[in-house]
């Protein structure tokens, strides 16, 4: 009986040791996204590992992105250009106690005029879905990876 317990405990420690040696499986990644040498001024970049681990980052106004924790290994990448902060700023404002602005209130202030956000390089829709974009990257475990995405314009 003690032999079975010792064997089970030994196997558990061995498995724990093997998992511990496999590394963090995550790494830091930064880079720049451009279309025809113009920076993508707003959007999101998504890294998807074949095992399903996913990370995403916002693309800043200068076209750069930074992921503190991206899945290490070969990943598929999706990129969307859009000014998310602009559209979030146009959402109805919350008042005290979390109540939303009433759109049916005739005394409510008119909504702000929508003007297009400043635009840089616009990413083609073909790059949006990581599984279909054809964009890939090899993220090295335990390193700071610099991965740029110089994209072509058009459909």
Image (cartoon, helix red, strand yellow):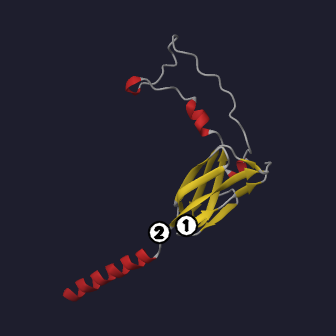
Identify the residue shown where x is 57% and y is 51%: 57
Label 2 crowding class (10 Å Cα cut-off): few <14, some 14-19, many 20+? few
Q: Is residue 144 left or right of residue 120?
A: left
Q: Is residue 130 visible?
A: no
Q: Is residue 37 left or right of residue 60?
A: right
Find residue 114 and name its label: none
Horizontal and vertical percent position of residue 47: 59, 58
The CA span between labels 1 and 2 is 8 Å
Horizontal and vertical percent position of residue 17: 38, 79
Q: Nearer the viewer, residue 80 or 143?
A: 143
Q: For numbered disc 1, what is the local secondary structure? A: loop
Up the image or down, 21 lies above or below 98; here it is below
Q: Which residue is mark 2?
A: 24
Horizontal and vertical percent position of residue 126: 72, 51
Quarter where residue 149 is shown: bottom right
Q: Are marks 1 and 2 in contact (CB under 8 Å)?
A: yes
Q: Which residue is mark 1?
A: 72
Screen quadrant of the N terminus: bottom left
């Amino acid at each position: 009986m003690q032999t079975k317990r010792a064997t089970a405990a030994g196997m558990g420690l061995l498995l724990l040791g093997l998992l511990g040696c496999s590394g963090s499986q995550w790494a830091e990644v930064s880079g720049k996204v451009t279309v025809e040498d113009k920076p993508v001024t707003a959007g999101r970049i998504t890294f998807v590992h074949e095992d399903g681990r996913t990370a995403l980052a916002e693309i800043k106004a200068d076209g750069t992105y930074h992921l503190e924790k991206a899945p290490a290994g070969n990943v598929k990448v999706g990129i969307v250009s859009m000014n998310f902060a602009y559209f979030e700023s146009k959402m109805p404002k919350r008042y005290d106690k979390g109540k939303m602005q009433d759109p049916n209130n005739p005394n409510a202030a008119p909504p702000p005029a929508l003007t297009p956000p400043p635009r840089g390089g616009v990413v083609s829709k073909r790059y949006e879905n990581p599984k279909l974009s054809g964009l890939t990257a090899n993220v090295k475990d335990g390193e700071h990876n610099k991965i740029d995405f110089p994209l072509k314009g058009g459909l």
